[in-house]
Image (cartoon, helix red, strand yellow):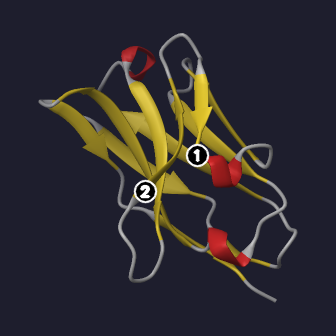
Amino acid sequence: QGQLEESGGGLVPPGGSLTLTCSISGIRSNIFLLGWYRQAPGEQREPVAHITRDRKTNYTDSVKGRFTISKDDYKMTVSLQMDSLKPEDTGVYYCRAYWSSLADYWGQGTQVVVSS
């Protein structure tokens, strides 16, 4: 059973940076599709960035050029470097590890607030 735990959220002013980290245990995370999602207040959860087992990445348009997803297969972590943060980046950020419908794991989320 996979377990994911996010860390690194907090309050940051517009234009600032944060790095989120997701620690993964209980699964061979190196073969999973790993991703970050976010949910703004009153909104549905949306994908932010993904990284494949062979390190191909993709991003939602609103974060391209500002966010960078990376992973460390040895440490079993996936990170999201967030730069030039905007108030609209505010939300709860979730980590996900997906292999199949029977192997689909989520973390509990970490809060990011971008505000002056």
Q: Which residue is mark 2?
A: 46
Query: Horizontal and vertical percent for residue 18?
Result: 75, 59
Please name the amino acid that badge 1 sits on.
Thr
Quarter that holds the C terminus: bottom right
Q: Residue at x 85, y 67 (%)?
A: 16
| Mark sitting earlier along the chain (1/2) | 2
Mark 1: few/some/many CA within 10 Å (<14, 14-19, 20+): few
* Picture mark count: 2
Instruction: Indicate which disc residue 102 carries.
Output: none
Amino acid on which the number 2 mark rests in the picture: Glu
Q: Is residue 73 above or below residue 5?
A: above
Check the picture and name the quadrant holding the N terminus. Answer: top left
Residue at 47% in and 39% down: 35
The quadrant where residue 31 appears:
top left
Q: Position of residue 17 (x, y in %)?
A: 81, 61
Q: Are marks 1 and 2 in contact (CB under 8 Å)?
A: yes
Among the 4 quarters of the image, the one containing residue 7: bottom right
Work out which residue is located at the far bottom of the displayed protein and give it.
116
Is 88 placed left or right of 29 in the picture?
right
Residue 60's label in the rendered image is 1
Q: Secondary structure at mark 1?
A: loop
* Residue 26 appears in the picture as rendered: no
State whether residue 82 is above or below residue 113.
above
| Image position of 59 (left or right of 15) | left
Q: Residues within 10 Å of mark 2 (few under 14, many from 20)?
A: some
Task: Please tell me which residue is depicted at 45% across the width and 32% down the height of the picture.
Answer: 34
